[in-house]
Image (cartoon, helix red, strand yellow):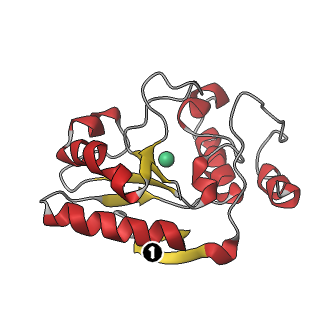
Amino acid sequence: MDKERLTEAYAILPMEFTENHELPFFDECDLHDLIDAGEDVFKRKVMMTKETYHAWQMMQKIAQREGVSLLIVSAFRSYTYQAKIIANKLAKGLSLNEILKVSALPGFSEHHTGRALDLTTDDEKQVLTQAFENTKAFQWLTQNAHKFNFYLSYSRNNSYGFIYEPWHWCYKS
Ligand SMILES: [Zn+2]
């Protein structure tokens, strides 16, 4: 655990880091392992680990060939970035309880590993909703993602108590 980076992130928030043994903790990946992976669907820069990138590129290409578009909404997120997401929601007046239903606190997001991808497809009007499970892209991922070592992290009724996230796929080497 990189205490210093975590402490920096929590300095943005009106709370301190407390260990939560009910949730998995994720180390922030080594920043040298991250590579520029182009742009997400909102034209923001995307970073992920090299291995994840190679697997992702292959998966996206094969899906495309089979008529399925896969696009990235979010990939690597640092502890600090995660803290900023929460700080922004607090500033908008959302309660911490409401926020934590959909956003993990710094240290508890799989996106810190640089191996998790939030995905969408070209015909989705709104990204990151459970309606993603009704898309052709989700169907395809369910049948094929494991061939590229990508797995759904938060299935329905998962043991972490996280919401069902059909869009969140993680590369496991
Ligand atoms: Zn995610």
Residue 155, quarter of the rendered image: top left
Q: Is residue 130 above or below residue 141?
A: above
Q: Give residue 10's position: percent from left, percent from top.
A: 80, 49
Q: Which residue is drawn at 72% across and 27% down?
A: 22
Q: In this view, does 139 lie to the left or right of 90?
A: left
Q: Which residue is drawn at 68% across and 63% down?
A: 29
Q: Which amino acid does label 1 sit on?
A: Ala
- The kind of secondary structure element at disc 1 is strand
Q: In this view, does 39 lie to the left or right of 131?
A: right
Label 1 within 8 A of ligand 1 by Cβ = no
Q: Looking at the image, can residue 121 be seen? A: yes
Q: In this view, does 39 lie to the left or right of 76?
A: left
Q: Position of residue 60 (x, y in %)?
A: 29, 65
Q: Height in image: 21 above or below 153?
A: above
Q: Residue at x 56, y 29 (%)?
A: 101
Point out the residue furthest to the top here. Answer: 157
Q: Can residue 44 be seen in this view?
A: no
The foreground one among 38 and 145 is 145
> As rendered, which of 104 and 88 lies closer to the eye?
104
Residue 18 position in % (x across, y down)? 84, 36
Percent x, y for residue 102?
A: 53, 35
Q: Mark 1 points at which residue?
A: 37
Q: In this view, does 15 lie above or below 31?
A: above
Examine the image and state in which quarter residue 63 appears.
bottom left
For the residue carrying disc 1, how many other residues have a C-alpha within 10 Å: few (<14), some (14-19), or many (20+)?
some
